[in-house]
Image (tube, helix red, strand yellow):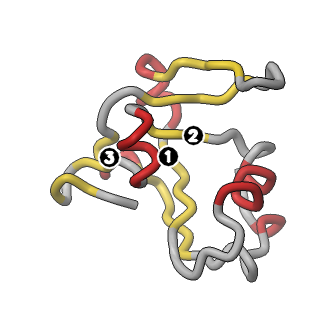
Amino acid sequence: MRTKDKSVMIGSSMDVKDGFIHLSTAKQTKKIANKYFSGMLDGYLLKIFYKKIQPKIKWEANSKGELFAHFYGEIPTYLILEAYPLSVREFNFDKLTY
């Protein structure tokens, strides 16, 4: 998780490059983590207050037609409800509460 300062999250280096923060639904989380972050040694899985950021989310289709949430802007850190430190190789996604 990258922050501009301690008050806003700007996302990962991939997010900055793409111009939006990549978000996943609870059902998408495990698949996306394994596809893009496999072997990551450190990082965070964030649970964000969806209703507060919903107006700035655009649901956009990937090449397979699956919809993914993209947040255009910075997310205030006070909207991060939980932060799970993780190593994708070891993290148990089944223990998460949604």
Dividing the picture into quadrants, the one containing residue 73 is top left
Identify the residue under disc 3. Answer: 10
Marks 1 and 2, the one that precedes in the sequence: 2
Q: Is residue 36 rendered to the left or right of residue 74?
A: right
Identify the residue under disc 2. Answer: 23
Q: Find out whether the residues at labels 1 and 2 contact each other: C-beta distance under 8 Å.
A: yes
Q: In front here: 23 or 48?
A: 23
Marks 3 and 2, the one that precedes in the sequence: 3
Q: Is residue 33 rendered to the left or right of residue 2?
A: right
- Residue shown at 56%/70% (left/top)? 84
Identify the residue under disc 1. Answer: 48
How many neighbours does mark 3 have within 10 angstroms: few (below 14), some (14-19), or many (20 or more)?
many
How many neighbours does mark 1 have within 10 angstroms: few (below 14), some (14-19), or many (20 or more)?
some
Marks 3 and 1, the one that precedes in the sequence: 3
**SS for tag 3?**
loop
- Residue shown at 29%/43% (left/top)? 76
Q: Disc 1 marks which amino acid? A: Ile
Q: Disc 3 marks which amino acid? A: Ile
Depth check, mark 1 against mark 2: the one in front is 2
Q: Is residue 28 rendered to the left or right of residue 12?
A: right
How far, Cα to Cα, is label 3 from label 1?
13 Å
Q: In front here: 48 or 45?
A: 45
Q: Residue 20 got which mark? A: none
- Estimate the x, y position of residue 66 in percent, counting from the top left: 79, 25
- Estimate the x, y position of residue 2 in percent, counting from the top left: 33, 59
Q: In front here: 38 or 27?
A: 38
- Residue shown at 41%/20% (left/top)? 56
- Residue shown at 77%/66% (left/top)? 93
